[in-house]
Image: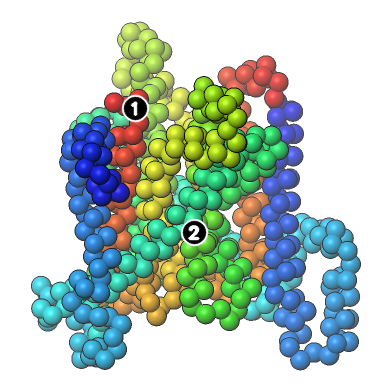
Amino acid sequence: MSTPAAAPGRLARWLDSDVWHSFRQSPMAMLAAVIAALCVFCSVFAPWVSPHNPFDLATLNLSDARLPPAWMEGGSRTFLLGTDDQGRDILSALFYGARLSLAVGLASVLLSLVVGVSLGLLSGFAGGAVDAFIMRVCDVMLSFPSILVALLINGVARAMFPQAPESLALGVLILAIALTGWVQYARTVRGSTLVERHKEYVQAARVIGVAPLRIMLRHVLPNVLGPVLVLATIQVAAAIITEATLSFLGVGVPPTSPSLGTLIRVGNDFLFSGEWWITIFPGAMLVLIALSVNLLGDWLRDALNPRLR
Amino acid sequence: MLVFILRRLVQAVIVMLTVAFIAFMLFQYVGDPVTSLLGQDATQQQREELRRDLGLDQPFPVQFARFVGNAVRGEFGLSLRQGRKVSTLIAERFPATLELALGAAVIALLAGIPLGVYSALRRGSFGSQLVMTLSLLGVSLPTFLIGILLILVFSVTLGWLPSFGRGDTVALGRWSTGLLTVDGWAHLVLPAITLSVFQLALILRLVRAEMLEVLRTDYVKFARARGLSNRAVYFGHALKNTLVPVITITGLQLGSLIAFAIITETVFQWPGMGFLFINAVQFADIPVMAAYLCLIALIFVIVNLVVDLLYFAVDPRLRIEKSTAGH
């Protein structure tokens, strides 16, 4: 992603690389990339792309409430995907919701990546008691479903700060998702580090007296990042789904600034009165994002795996 | 063999003690139990008395030992929100969750294994590709969305099946079951399917992968060369050998079924433990959370143990390898 901005020499190299070629060969990956890019674009530029501002109370009109999508009878062209019970445009709420979902997902993946990669490097490099301890913690974490761990962290945070402001709820949510995700990175990085540390370049660096920390960060780290990249892509989808699930269960993002999960939760109440669009469109958006990111991750795994070439 | 079992038991005890310790820390340091029991305006003397009664003035290891002792007897105190004993609350909810999880496991196995075998044998056919695509969708769709879609189609649009609660239940002693009434079965269908989708897709893909692997082996070729019918080769020889990993995964998934039931129970308002737990998280009801945590850990540990033993029973090769490897 960052390469096109680099020097032209690097851009040319990137366009000539195996990864780019395999991308051009895979229609599935290209389709997924287009959909993912579209979703990201709409979320990042939500304030400019959305036809309405769903949070501006002044523009809401209750007489517009519960309008069906434009192509159905009674639908209005101003509200392409219909409106919810307060007259909010679903399409706009969708963009803003996806924006929040993506932000939470990316933030928690970034956090768990940093924690996981550091602990994995440390574990693989230090060995001994440190390694054993970190790996046992991983085992315990892995034996519980991540949604349960996230729920537990959430509940504990609620008990500790009963009067917490809503901005804190978002932080807790990110932390809860991140703390369930780091194990995967730690195990992957530890595995590759164990292989790398016995290679000649590491021994050479050690012999000429490079400090261990520098060997870890400058020499070993770049060589173990391939699998981490694949994992991070897939984890973004997983984190977005976890966030949506937590929000749906009512312990995630507060309803004042709804994410996709919150929108689905709210819309769920109107399912029985026939207003299916309030919940189905956010759901479809969620699946679209998760599926396209997952497909990209699958492709990336195959493209980066030299054994499959 | 015996050494292996003992090792496993020791590991199980360590995991349980760790979880108990986390639960204990929750009790001890998250919120003040004295304040939550007495309220804000109790006198200093009342507080001291309660503190002594609860044993909070004793040293840390003694308190932890007492906590573990109570936990073993299923005593987790009173729910902060409902004021009833946590053990009774959970005992009331347990049958609902277990019936839901078992229903889902049965659906996942009964549909997953045949579909997996089919898509392995008819690889490349339209039906098999359809099955694989659907299973990919099953893995990617969040559980709660599957539930909502099922409700939309079968409850709201078609009106065939009920969408919330357990329906009529029959009390068998302390166990309330929904499996003895038609209404109870009708209420079980949608939640059980919702919960099973992920496991179904998982089992299907596993069976398919294992079948493809086994069908390439020499003994299958040999069985064919002996002139055995396709049926005998596929089901008598190949399928039998794919079942070892399937047993393991299914067993291990039973634990996560109970945990994932949290989401399904919320969607369908199913009066199980997961619903209880979600309410506890929302209202920071620490005793219920701690008890649920310990119970889930116990179920996980027992399931893991049984699966390990089952593995030994099913696969004779393991017994030899393990004993020579000195485990």
Query: Would you identify the image quadrant in which residue A91 lies?
Result: bottom left
Q: Amino acid at mark 1?
A: Pro
Residue closer to the observer: A200 or B257: A200
Residue closer to the observer: A215 or B161: A215
Residue bearing mark 1: A306
Q: Amino acid at mark 2?
A: Ile
Instruction: Give residue A194's position: percent from left, percent from top.
Output: 55, 30
Residue closer to the observer: B238 or B131: B131
Name the chain under label 1: A
Q: Is residue A71 left or right of residue B46?
A: left
Camera sees residue A275: yes
Cα distance between the residues tagged 2 and 1: 31 Å
Instruction: Give residue A209's position: percent from left, percent from top.
Output: 60, 30
Q: Do residues under tags 2 and 1 come within 8 Å of each other at their CB atoms?
A: no
Task: Tell which circle, 2 or 1, labels the residue nearer the N-terminal end.
Answer: 2
Residue bearing mark 2: A177
Seen at 37% across and 27% down, the residue is B211
Q: Is residue A80 left or right of residue B58?
A: left
User: In the figure, A209 relative to A72: above or below?
Assistant: above
Q: Is residue A302 left or right of residue A31?
A: right
> Which residue is farthest front?
A208
